[in-house]
Image (cartoon, rainbow, N blue to C red):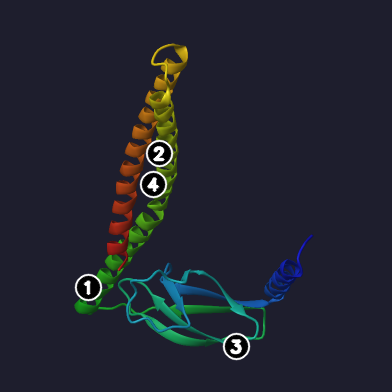
């Protein structure tokens, strides 16, 4: 029988989903001159080593109850632009932003360093995600190793307790013991190898993500 607590959880999730689904949005279409810039929404970025919220040109989704958007536009080689955009009453507002070239060598160097930092962070995050697979394989292989060791120990105990040290039954136990032992060793090798690979990926990923 389904408990009342479980039904309450399901009912709450349905209410939350309906509230999210019924939330209405307006859109702000932004393009720049020149094209292909990046946009950060509702925050003033002093550095741009984090990934942008949007690639421009593009549509920005804005909750219907909000009437303005704080927008920071970044494009290498140009001054970053921060503006507060007031939306029209229409479903979609349009904005074209002209970017000003920067001739400040120090600032241009800072932009390139920010992009290099971002690239390192993205590589780090990918390595952290990639580490999940070998670490998961290592965990599974460890369980297999323990199971094979347990089975091998059982077969070993049977052979040691056997009063008859010859014959088909005794030899079968020895063969099974050898088989389980070999499988345990193989699984142990997989466990250690994938653990080292996963830990290395995770370590390098964490280092690069800062």
Q: Are marks 2 and 1 in contact (CB under 8 Å)?
A: no
Q: Nearer the viewer, mark 1 or mark 4?
A: 4
Of the numbered discs 3 and 4, the one sitting upstream in the chain is 3
Name the residue: 64% across, 78% down.
26
Q: Marks 1 and 4, Cα distance to the nearest angstrom?
A: 38 Å
Residue receiving disc 1? 109
Residue receiving disc 4? 134
Q: Marks 4 and 2, Cα distance to the nearest angstrom?
A: 16 Å
Q: Are marks 4 and 2 in contact (CB under 8 Å)?
A: no
Residue receiving disc 3? 67
Quadrant containing the N terminus is: bottom right
Dot 3: element:
loop
Q: Is residue 75 above or below residue 191?
A: below
Q: Nearer the viewer, mark 2 or mark 1?
A: 2
Residue 124 relative to residue 89: left or right = left
Front in this rendered view, residue 101 or 10: 10
Q: Marks 3 and 1, Cα distance to the nearest angstrom?
A: 36 Å
Of the numbered discs 2 and 3, the one sitting upstream in the chain is 3
């Amino acid at each position: 029988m389904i408990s009342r607590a479980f039904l309450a959880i399901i009912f709450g999730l349905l209410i939350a989903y309906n509230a999210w689904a019924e939330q209405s949005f307006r859109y702000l279409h932004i393009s720049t001159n020149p094209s292909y810039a990046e946009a950060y929404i509702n925050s003033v970025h002093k550095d741009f080593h984090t990934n942008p919220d949007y690639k421009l040109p593009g549509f920005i989704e804005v909750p219907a109850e909000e009437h303005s958007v704080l927008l920071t536009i970044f494009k290498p080689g140009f001054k970053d632009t921060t503006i507060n955009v007031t939306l029209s009453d229409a479903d979609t507002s349009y904005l074209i932003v002209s970017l000003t070239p920067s001739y400040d060598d120090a600032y241009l160097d800072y932009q390139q360093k920010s992009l290099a930092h971002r690239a390192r962070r993205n590589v780090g995050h990918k390595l952290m995600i990639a580490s999940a697979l070998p670490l998961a394989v290592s965990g599974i292989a460890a369980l297999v190793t323990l199971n094979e060791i347990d089975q091998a120990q059982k077969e070993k105990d049977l052979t040691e307790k056997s009063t008859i040290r010859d014959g088909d039954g005794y030899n079968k136990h020895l063969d099974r013991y050898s088989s389980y032992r070999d499988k345990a060793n193989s699984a142990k090798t997989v466990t250690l190898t994938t653990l080292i690979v996963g830990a290395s990926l995770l370590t390098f990923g964490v280092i690069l993500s800062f």
